[in-house]
């Protein structure tokens, strides 16, 4: 197991141990910030227009895919996202969310799966909060 895989596994174990069950994540009583996360994540995975959520992506945000990483902004067009995530018919379930006590960073684990139930994978997404810009997507590990 390479260093990147170990790091992803540690994040997954941490979030699974400290996170919130998916049924509770986006309930009516959920933290309003979580609704913002859902909008960004769904826009990426479902191939939606990213114009409304671009301000929630850090300029230096990156995506890790396999043994490489690159700027998340390389995946803003629908064709690039389909190459990375597959078509927009993937199902998506929020597995766990964890925020630090100060509510300045959030780790989200998402399970995505192809429509034919093959190719299930867990993805980790990290958001950070700044005083001036609010919540922004920082890292995405596919």
Image (cartoon, rainbow, N blue to C red):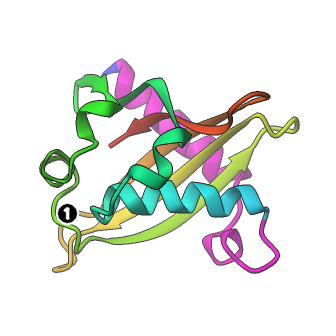
Residue 142 highlighted magenta (yes or no):
no
Residue at x 28%, y 24% (from the top left corner): 69
Q: Quadrant of the C terminus?
A: top left
Residue 139 image point, x, y percent: 47, 32
Q: Residue furthest right?
A: 102
Residue 121 visible in this rendered orientation of the protein = no
Q: 125 or 42, which is in the foreground?
A: 42
Kind of element beneath mark 1: loop
Residue at x 26%, y 71% (from the top left corner): 90
Residue at x 79%, y 28% (from the top left corner): 131
Q: How many marks?
A: 1
Q: Quadrant of the N terminus?
A: top left
Q: Main secondary structure of the magenta part?
A: helix
Q: Is residue 118 left or right of residue 4?
A: left
Residue 80 image point, x, y percent: 16, 45
Residue at x 24%, y 32% (from the top left corner): 74
Is the residue 131 above or below the residue 25 in the image?
above
Is the residue 91 above or below the residue 37 in the image?
below
Quarter of the view holding residue 38: bottom right
Residue 53 image point, x, y percent: 49, 50
Q: Which residues are magenta?
A: 3-30
Give the labeled residue for mark 1: 119
Q: 28 or 134, which is in the foreground?
A: 134
Residue 109 image point, x, y percent: 52, 53
Tell me if mark 1 has few (under 14), some (14-19) or many (20+) residues whose alpha carbon lies within 10 angstroms of its own: few
Q: Is residue 117 left or right of residue 123?
A: left
Q: Residue furthest front?
A: 51
Is the residue 123 above or below the residue 101 in the image?
below
């Amino acid at each position: 197991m390479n260093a990147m895989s170990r790091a992803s596994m540690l994040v997954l174990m941490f979030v699974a141990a400290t996170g919130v069950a998916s049924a509770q994540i986006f309930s009516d009583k959920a933290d309003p910030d979580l609704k913002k996360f859902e909008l960004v994540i769904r826009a990426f995975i479902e191939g939606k227009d990213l114009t409304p959520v671009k301000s929630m992506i850090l300029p230096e945000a990156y995506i890790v895919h396999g043994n490489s990483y690159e700027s998340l902004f390389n995946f803003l067009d629908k064709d690039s996202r389909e190459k990375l995530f597959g078509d927009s018919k993937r199902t998506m379930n929020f597995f766990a969310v964890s925020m630090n006590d100060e509510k300045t960073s959030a780790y989200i684990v998402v399970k995505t799966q192809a429509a034919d139930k093959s190719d299930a994978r867990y993805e980790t997404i990290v958001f950070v909060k700044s005083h001036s810009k609010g919540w922004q997507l920082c890292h995405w590990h596919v």
